[in-house]
Image: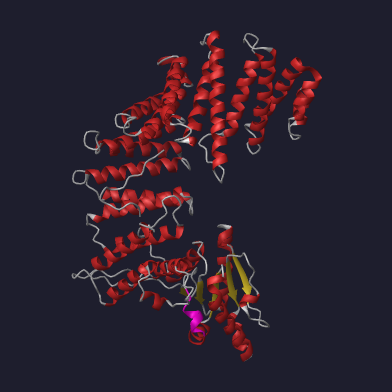
Amino acid sequence: MSVIDRHPLAQDIPVNEIVSQAVPSLNQQIYLRLRMALSLNLRRQILMVVCDDAALRSQLATQLQAELAQETPATSLVSLDLDLENPDILAHVQAGMPNYQITGIDRLTRQPVHIQRTFLDSLSAIALQLPKLDFNLVLWLTRPWCRSIQQTVPNFWQWHTGLFEFEGDPFGDNSVQIPPPATAPTNGHRKLKLDNELSDFVLASVMQTIHLEDQASIGDILQTNHPNAKPLQFLQQIEDLHQQRASAATIAQLYRDLGDWYRDRLDPVRPSSGDLTIVIRAYEQTLKLIDMKSEQVPDLLNDIANLYWIKARSGEGAVETNLEKALKAYQFAIDRTDPAIQPQTYAMIQNNLGSVYSDLAGLRSPEENLQHAIAAYKASIEYRPFDTDPARHAATQNNLGTAYWNLAQHRMPMFNLQSAVLAYNEALRYYTPEREPMHYAMLQNNLGTAYWNLSRCDQAVQELAMAEDFLHLAIGAYRVALIYRTLEAAPSAYAATQNNLGTAYWHLANQDTTHYDDQATYMLCAIDAYQESLSAVQYLTANLSYAPTLSFDLSATHHHIGLAYYQMATDQRATLETKERSQFLHHALKHQVRAAQGWQEQPDFQPSAVGQLSQIVKGIYEREGIQGQTQALSQIPPTFLPQVMREL
């Protein structure tokens, strides 16, 4: 588990792209704005798209529909070519579809007046019913029809949340290019316009939040003190400052305030993708306007990177792309931070950089990215020693230990696992049971897992200690963790640690060096731990309205407890009554069936569970005869019976 830092003086969380070196065409920007507006999962947006080129208009509408279809069902776009016999839009939309685009409106020009009037009346009807509607509407218009709607149906026009005007081919060589920004004059003013893309996002967000059931216009809302109208006031102030040619620093502060307003209202558990985009966009504008030598720059870049990391962790958008953007922002921030002058900021950014590299390692190039993560964590620790910043020092040591543990799965297992143990123990200097009981338990669990891995490492067993010794260390660490990771306090963590404990006991019972008298004891301990883990999952399932998220493979737990029951039942030296052996075999059968069912989509694992079924049925037949075998076979799903029957 990685920990992302924030500067103690900076606010809690912050978002869009870091300034790109290549300036895209105006039409490319407009198209991306349009697609983004429909990707935000907002509702009741009315988007006016103006394009006088019929071929280009058709191309854009087709591409928009195709690209949105590749995202999620919530962003799918239904295209409706306007029915000239009945141009009433509401008559053709269906309940349950999220987005509609209307094409062919330009053909109304050649239709009788009463047909045109029917279309315009349908827009008025939409304006009246909009608070009750649950879809977005995209109108593809020519400029004359856009002006006609604005003048003829003002009650509909006031509801539009975005205006997108295309000129030329946005994908060819004739697209309009934005000139590079002018050099800032000495008075600090930069000739920049209000960010229209950001304005569209904010307007859509406010329209979504303020349902406007009283049919108030945006202008009316600006005159009120509605708390959720504050973003529009920020935009109005920014526009006024641009008109007044105010200094870049003054405008930058308002963009920062706008971003802070949205950031302070982000849901800490499930932040809205739309709101994250607005914060990033606002902070990006701030970054464009402030002096790049300002002390604000590293903190601002760290905030932007944090938000991309949050976006990646929440699964919004392309995870890898968001992680890469976070990575670039952190690296950019590091380049502008002098550790001798700002050691705390430098350490914070290095820690965060390590966390992003760790996440990237789960997607690609694990060895390379984990080595980068380790280097970043070490750089952070250098400037946040235990004596001056014990809490953050411990958090980074935990991150470092986890990075070493992950790297051990790919290369140099003994060295990296030893390094993980050292880092976890260093973190325990701060995370004591009295100060941070749950963090203390987490670290003990991590230590136990590192020791368990060392027991499986041939080099460590040959050069450091016996596997049995490492397993005893692992069991001790897991048991300490369970003092604080109780079912009541942390059921998911309790289930995971009990599962780990069961695995450690199971391996200890199967060590050649373990005395026979102890083997049965350890195997029963493994069964008890696995059963506690499964009971905790049942507890979670009963108390949640959704399937619990687990950090371990539940099917593997069923498989392992099934193996343990089978081994106990078939061990002739075990002091078990005949009835107990039969019970253990039936328990083994039940758990292996659960394992085989849970591994339906994992062909590499499922055969091991299915293969155990035939062995268990044979054991039941030897003790209970044909009647017991028949009963056992009746408990096996038909899918697995052919293989089981072949092996009997």
> Toward which corner of the image does residue 4 lie, by quadrant?
top left
Where 99 falls versus 534 (above or below)?
below
Task: Tell me what residue is drawn at x 61 percent, y 65 percent.
Answer: 97
Where 576 falls versus 35 (above or below)?
above
Q: Nearer the viewer, residue 8 or 382?
A: 8
Query: What residue range appears in magenta?
Result: 153-160
Q: Nearer the viewer, residue 67 or 228?
A: 228
Going by the picture, which residue comes out furthest to the bottom?
113
Task: Tell me what residue is drawn at x 55 percent, y 8 percent.
Answer: 516
Image quadrant in which the C terminus is located:
top right
Image quadrant in which the N terminus is located:
top left
Where's residue 382, x and y in %?
Answer: 25, 36
Task: Tell me what residue is drawn at x 57 percent, y 43 percent.
Answer: 547
> Toward which corner of the image does residue 126 lie, by quadrant?
bottom right
Where 518 falls versus 211 (above or below)?
above
The magenta stretch spans residue 613: no
Q: Nearer the viewer, residue 284 or 516?
A: 516
Residue 571 visible in rendering:
yes
| Number of numbered discs | 0
| Scheme of image coloration | secondary structure
